Amino acid sequence: MDFLTFYKNKVVLITGGSQGIGKELAKQVLSYQGKVIITARNAEKLLQVKKEFGLDEMTLMIHQGDVSNYQDNVDLIKKIITQFGKLDILITNAGISGYGEVEIMKPEVATQIINTNIYGTLFPIMAAIPELKKSHGSILLVSSVAGLSGLPGASAYSLSKMSLIALAESLSIELERYQIFVGIALPGFTKNENDKKALSPVGKSENVPERPERFTMSREKMASNYLSQIKNKKYYKVYTVFGLVAHFVSKYLPRIFHFIIKRKYIPA
């Protein structure tokens, strides 16, 4: 089955859809004649996407909200059903990057990272399950290769992304009897937009450093991979060469993996 056949007329909710991979996912689903809802905190960026795509509310719906707020997710699902009558696919793409050692990280920074990455994944799923049961739909959780092992200097981020693996494992069993597909994607480095930000340990929003080109994957390719994973119902996928190498070494050569991390880590 090709992408057009699979995604045509599917109603797809993408969290964190105002930029980056989320925006590209929306663009590709729309090109396959699907219906898309994107949600994010930044209303201005959502409106920019809406203007750029030039589509009406019956094809592309935007929603300014907070995925870590449960009631906001419930309200969004009701809005989707009123507009489209169903929900077929949920991609929990929203997330926030952060760095800093535990000792120097402000509690509110850790809270923001955990709320966005954990509750911002869990709550949309909780709100969407009743509708996905009706459509026998799909859920794709977006984690990270940082969730393969606890990374020094990125403890809160690794904690939040590693927890999504456990969540996906639980959901895949819980929802199997409803014929809901659950998958988890663990991307490595992706080519960032220029305004991609990460939280410093004191809460300052800083530019994410550029990664070497050979280690990164384009947003277009990453989004296409996610859509292929959903279409082909592949539960667990690691992306980019860097991600695949990190996955192999951490799983089969854990002592070497931790030795490399210790050697490469520069304390603050």
Image (tube, rainbow, N blue to C red):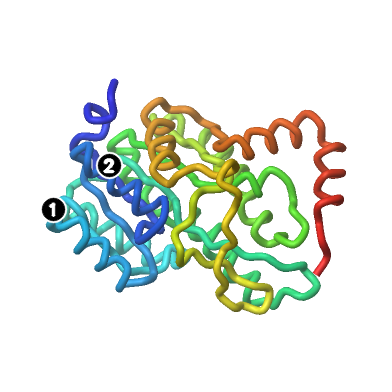
| Residue 196, placed above or below residue 140 | below
Q: CA distance from mark 1 to mark 2?
A: 14 Å
Q: Position of residue 130 (x, y in %)?
A: 34, 46
Tell which residue pokes out farthest to the top in this image.
Answer: 1
Q: Position of residue 20 (x, y in %)?
A: 41, 55
Mark whose residue sits in front, 1 or 2: 2
Which residue is the site of mark 1? 58
- Of label 1 and label 2, which has the lower sequence position? 2
Left or right relative to 2: residue 263? right
| Residue 81, placed above or below residue 29 | below
Residue type at tag 1:
Met
The quarter of the image holding the N terminus is: top left
The quarter of the image holding the C terminus is: bottom right
Of helix, strand and loop, which one carries label 2? Answer: helix
Q: Position of residue 113 (x, y in %)?
A: 59, 66
Q: Residue 256 versus residue 157: which sits nearer the camera?
A: 256
Q: Residue 69 versus residue 212: which sits nearer the camera?
A: 212
Give the class, few, some or many, for how many residues have Cα within 10 Å of label 1's Cα (few <14, many ≥20). few
Q: Residue at left 28%, top 24%?
A: 2
Image quadrant assignment for residue 100: bottom right
Q: Residue 70 versus residue 195: which sits nearer the camera?
A: 195
Residue type at tag 2:
Val
Image quadrant assignment for residue 246: top right
Q: Position of residue 75 (x, y in %)?
A: 30, 64
Q: Residue at left 36%, top 68%?
A: 65
Q: Residue 72 versus residue 92: which sits nearer the camera?
A: 92
Left or right relative to 2: residue 190? right
Q: Residue at left 16%, top 50%?
A: 59
Residue 29 - label: 2
Q: Residue at left 38%, top 52%?
A: 22
